[in-house]
Image (spheres, rainbow, N blue to C red):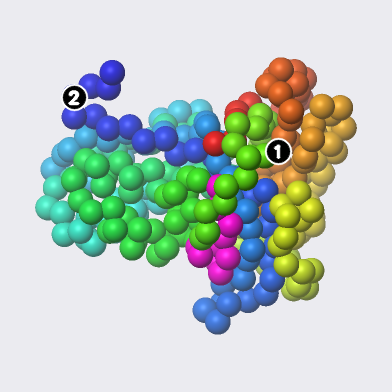
Amino acid sequence: MRPEGVYTEPAPAKLNLALHVRGKLPDGRHALETLFAFCTDGDRVEGEEADDVTLEVIGPFAGALAGDNLVLTAACALRDAAQVDRGAALRLVKNLPVASGIGGGSADAAAALRLLTQLWSIDPAHAIAVAPAIGADVPACLLSLTARGEGAGDKLELVDDPDIAGTPVLLVNPLEPLSTGAVFARWDGVDHGPLGAWRDGRNDLEVPARELVPAIGDVLDWLGALPESTFVRMSGSGATCFALFADGDARDAAAAACPDQWWRLASFLR
């Protein structure tokens, strides 16, 4: 039972089961076709009412965050949009690596929007309205449901796929941060075709990401060699990669065998 007045929102890790870069949008952003899926584990945002908006960051990867981040950006944007005259003391429990292609900052911001919508008793429409300006992945993370994303990834259509929900998944990251901007800057500019079935798709950012962080190739090779893995891919702009499994025991055995120098998270898809 949570303490009276303290709210908690999960910020689940986001995976791109496929990510096709189709070109450029008129505003200069990249045109994407992707399938978002979310894990049952990730970061966590806690909060209670206060006079001002403040943020404390704790957890294994707290030290990798410096200064303002998207949680504060989201909180201030929501307060302004809803014309709220109250604040919130927020705490981010940072369990996921930073700049790792699994939505960390976007998921944290989305969790803050959901939490503050409850804490301040405001219309959820305000959170929906401010989410796109915070980041292209924030609308998807606000839903935290399996969805197809188009445009910059912010035009969403919910997907009901029985092969996704409940699937055991292992996330592995070589613990080398990777700039999304740097990866997109190395994209070859070629439209390799539309996204159909996600298992037949690809991640068009894998090649440039591997050029910047060759260890991504090592992770993908290791995951692909696991006899029980059924699907392997890099998520987002990297460097996190993931493998799907038919059952939790196989996933747990893979997690136990993961090289010690890599970060790993054994979870399930929502």
Q: Secondary structure at mark 1?
A: strand
Identity, as a three-letter code, of the amino acid under mark 1: Phe
The Cα atoms of the two marked residues, 1 and 2, are separated by 38 Å
- CB under 8 Å between callouts 1 and 2? no
Q: At which x and y percent is residue 21?
A: 69, 66
Which of the two residues, 152 or 160, is positioned nearer the viewer here? 160
On the image, numbered disc 1 is attached to which residue? 242
Tell me where the magenta segment starts and ends, as one range: 146-155
Q: At which x and y percent is residue 20?
A: 70, 62
Which of the two residues, 130 or 207, is positioned nearer the viewer here? 130
Which of the two residues, 64 or 159, is positioned nearer the viewer here? 159
**Residue at 69 percent of width and 71 percent of height:** 22
- Say whether residue 218 is left or right of residue 179: right
Q: Secondary structure at mark 2?
A: loop
Q: At which x and y percent is residue 250?
A: 75, 21
Residue 152 is a magenta residue: yes
- Say whether residue 143 is left or right of residue 254: left
Identity, as a three-letter code, of the amino acid under mark 2: Glu
Q: Quadrant of residue 206?
A: bottom right
**Residue at 58 percent of width and 65 percent of height:** 150
Residue 4 - label: 2
In the image as oriented, which residue stretches furthest toward the bottom?
26
Quarter of the image where the N terminus is located: top left
Give the mark, 1 or 2, whose residue is nearer the N terminus.
2
Q: At which x and y percent is residue 270?
A: 54, 36
